[in-house]
Image (tube, rainbow, N blue to C red):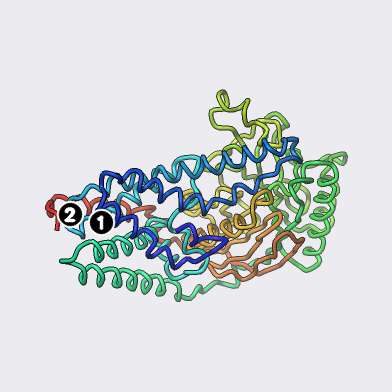
């Protein structure tokens, strides 16, 4: 299962990779906990190996060996956390009760329920659903029905039916037919949703520009790196403004300084960029900081052509260990060197509204791309397109590809155009069907302009949320009551 995502991306394996574990659970129920944990270590350990890319952190003043130890410790901790949830699932489904259909329903309902709980915690990334992104666009369209749950349920159900075809001689053919039918029907439904025309109105179009500054983190927060960022983003802004775009998106913390409230003073380090905005009068979505150097927020600002702040969004989902330290009183003295900014980052409010001169936007800053509810909440409040600003420069190259995969899923779930700007790659334009119309290279400076469209549709997921989860829980309860005997 770990090979289904970047860098390997053998996404088809996800439709069979859970079945071997499931078979072992039925044959060795006493070992369910440890079998599930081992499978989870394999999946999450491989999928999240990019976390070790934060090493070396010598540019932050962390000794080489200490940097290695920190990166390995972070990777192990996140892997174990992911494996814990698989172990819980395995402990429950390893309990042999009911017919094979009941077992499959139980497996689907429990996995999806645990995912819902897991998403409410600070650490969440590698769901089964994202193993299909960005390539299997048909199945990803099930996300329009009930978010991650619809996709994950299809994957678990197919694996469960395959398990029954292996484990039960009596129902082998029936279970195999059920697996093929589930696979076929889920893809057919997704393909139907995928092939529906977008019917975008020219009246709701605007020309969006993207700047990928390519300023490595090793220099970004030092004077030389800041000058490079300021010059690069100013040049990129002027290039896109000359090309006639209506608005320009910069990445997360593109200009890593405090952007003063309302208007910048002439003496501000960011005044050079501000002058370009005033000269060309093109709206800029600027990734920067707000607050002061003791308490600040990771923010995206809408800056209009007169240099005024039109709207502000503060990052809600902060990165544990990178932007804040969980249980700081206990762990702070050990790992506070992880954050290069020695201050307290403040999370934004959940119910922020980000209005722009082109309509209301949905905003994601970096890590937030993994949290579907964060997007659904903004779409339900009138978001017409979404802006994704990220850094990604301090991880292994597979991370930006996985991040792109997350945003492809969010674009489909919401039926919205996505504008992605990252520091070092991959920046992109994604349409509501998840098709990547443009994607930058990695570790290169890039600018791009593309026509995108505001949309006001509401998918079932936006309107009803994760309703399918409760259907599975109810169906499983009925099955356990109606068919209590094993078969």
Q: Nearer the viewer, residue 99 or 189?
A: 99
- Which of pointers 1 and 2 lies earlier in the amino acid sequence? 1
Question: What residue is shown with label 2?
Answer: 479
The picture quadrant where one finds residue 441 is bottom right
Going 34% across and 70% down the picture, which residue do you hit? 183
User: What residue is at 52 percent from the left and 54 percent from the top?
Assistant: 47
430 to 192, vertically: above or below: above
Q: Locate residue 419 relative to residue 443 in the image: left or right.
A: left
SS category of the residue bearing label 2: helix
Q: Residue 142 is drawn in which quadrant?
A: bottom left
Say which of 420 and 454 sits in front. Answer: 420
**Residue that sits furthest to the top in the current view:** 329
Residue 216, image x and y in percent? 75, 50
Image quarter (top left, top right, bottom left or bottom right) of the C terminus: bottom left
Whether residues under marks 1 and 2 lie with C-beta atoms below 8 angstroms apart, the answer is yes
Tell me the residue at 51%/39% (across/down).
77
Residue 283: percent from the left, percent from the top?
A: 73, 56
The residue under label 1 is 105
Instruction: Give x and y (percent) for residue 135.
Output: 51, 69
Residue in view at x 62 percent, y 31 percent: 335
Q: Secondary structure at mark 1?
A: helix
Q: Position of residue 163 (x, y in %)?
A: 28, 61
User: In the picture provided, is 432 more to the left or to the right than 314?
Assistant: left
């Amino acid at each position: 299962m770990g090979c289904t995502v970047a860098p390997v991306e053998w996404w088809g394996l996800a439709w069979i990779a859970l079945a071997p574990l499931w078979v072992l659970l039925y044959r060795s129920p006493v070992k369910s906990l440890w079998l599930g944990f081992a499978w989870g270590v394999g999946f999450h350990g491989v999928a999240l190996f990019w976390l070790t890319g934060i090493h070396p952190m010598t540019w932050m003043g962390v000794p080489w060996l200490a940097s290695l130890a920190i990166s390995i410790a972070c990777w192990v901790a996140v892997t174990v956390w992911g494996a814990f949830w698989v172990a819980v699932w395995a402990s429950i489904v390893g309990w042999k009760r009911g017919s094979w259909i009941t077992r499959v329903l139980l497996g689907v309902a429990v996995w999806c329920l645990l995912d819902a709980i897991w998403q409410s915690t600070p650490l969440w990334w590698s769901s089964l659903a994202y193993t299909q992104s960005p390539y299997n666009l048909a199945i990803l369209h099930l996300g329009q029905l009930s978010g991650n749950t619809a996709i994950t349920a299809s994957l678990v159900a197919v694996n469960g039916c395959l398990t029954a075809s292996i484990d039960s001689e009596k129902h082998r053919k029936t279970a195999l037919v059920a697996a093929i039918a589930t696979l076929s029907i889920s893809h057919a439904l997704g393909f139907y949703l995928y092939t529906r025309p977008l019917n975008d109105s020219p009246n709701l179009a605007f020309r969006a520009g993207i700047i990928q500054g390519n300023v490595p983190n090793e220099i970004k927060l030092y004077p030389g790196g800041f000058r490079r960022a300021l010059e690069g983003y100013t040049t990129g802004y002027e290039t896109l403004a000359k090309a006639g775009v209506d608005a320009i998106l910069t990445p997360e913390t593109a200009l890593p300084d405090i952007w003063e409230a309302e208007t910048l003073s002439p003496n501000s380090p960011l005044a050079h960029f501000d002058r370009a905005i005033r000269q060309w009068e093109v709206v800029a979505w600027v990734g920067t900081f707000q607050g002061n150097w003791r308490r600040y927020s990771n923010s995206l600002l809408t800056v209009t052509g007169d240099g005024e702040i039109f709207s502000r969004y503060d990052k809600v989902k902060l990165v544990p260990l990178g932007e804040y330290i969980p249980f700081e009183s206990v762990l702070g003295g050990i790992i506070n060197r992880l954050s290069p900014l020695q201050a307290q980052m403040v999370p934004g409010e959940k119910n922020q509204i980000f209005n722009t001169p082109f309509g209301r936007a949905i905003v994601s800053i970096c890590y937030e791309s993994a949290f579907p509810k964060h997007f659904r909440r903004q779409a339900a409040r009138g978001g017409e397109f979404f802006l994704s600003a990220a850094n990604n420069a301090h991880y292994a190259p597979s991370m930006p590809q996985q991040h792109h995969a997350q945003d492809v899923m969010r674009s489909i779930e919401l039926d919205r155009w996505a504008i992605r700007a990252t520091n070092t790659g991959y920046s992109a334009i994604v349409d509501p069907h998840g098709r990547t119309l443009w994607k930058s290279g990695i570790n290169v400076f890039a600018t791009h302009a593309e026509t995108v469209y505001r949309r006001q549709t509401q998918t079932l997921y936006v309107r009803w949320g994760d309703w399918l989860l409760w259907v599975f829980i109810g169906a499983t309860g009925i099955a356990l009551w109606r068919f209590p005997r094993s078969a």
